[in-house]
Amino acid sequence: MESRITGVMVYYYFVCKRKLWYFCHGLNMEGEHENVLLGKILDERSYQRDDKHINIDNIINIDFIREHRELHEVKKSRAIEEAGIWQVKYYLYYLKERGVNDLKARIDYPLLKQTLAVELANKDEEELEIVLNDILEIRNREIPPRFETVKMCKNCAYHDLCLI
């Protein structure tokens, strides 16, 4: 099985490990899900002057980069903020591992007219190495992790699949 870990996988790791497993095994339920469609509309209509969707190695997909070496991730709400923070920290980590240093990062919440600065500390790098190993372990499982109800279940595109 392939060893690449994408930013989406890191995000899903912090949202739901079962969702991560489904995603890693090609079960993508989000294509027509209402929340995902709303996010796509928000993406299309926000930050139109910026070059968007900077794909690096088919591993990370940065929403946009502004002057002063600052990358941005756009989120609809703060509902799963921890997952978004770790996704952005992974972007910084991934780029640092490839020799790109001194980057800044922000999560933008255009609907809330708020931003959140994100930094990568040494302890975050150590934590990310554990997370990345966990993601590989979850992806290599024969069956998905056990179903656990979390706050986001009712709005999740995978909800019905998890209940089967």
Image: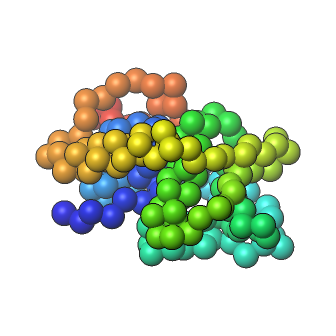
x and y percentages locating residue 47 in the rendered image: 80, 64
Res. 9 visible in picture: yes
x and y percentages locating residue 19 in the rendered image: 37, 43
Identify the residue at image location x=78%, y=67%. 68
In the image, 114 versus 145, the foreground residue is: 114
Identify the residue at image location x=34%, y=42%. 130
Location of the N terminus (image quadrant):
bottom left
Q: How many marks?
A: 0
x and y percentages locating residue 149 in the rendered image: 40, 23
Identify the residue at image location x=57%, y=36%. 82
In the image, 76 versus 63, the foreground residue is: 63
In the image, 33 versus 62, the foreground residue is: 62
User: In the picture provided, is 120 more to the left or to the right than 117?
Assistant: left
Q: Please say which color scheme the image uses.
A: rainbow
Identify the residue at image location x=30%, y=29%. 147
User: In the picture provided, is 66 more to the left or to the right than 4?
Assistant: right
Location of the C terminus (image quadrant):
top left
- Quadrant housing residue 24: bottom left
Q: Above or below — where is 134 with respect to 6?
A: above
Q: Above or below — where is 12 with respect to 101?
A: above
Res. 20 visible in picture: no
Q: Above or below — where is 70 with respect to 83?
A: below
User: In the picture provided, is 12 more to the left or to the right than 101?
Assistant: left
- Quadrant housing residue 43: bottom right
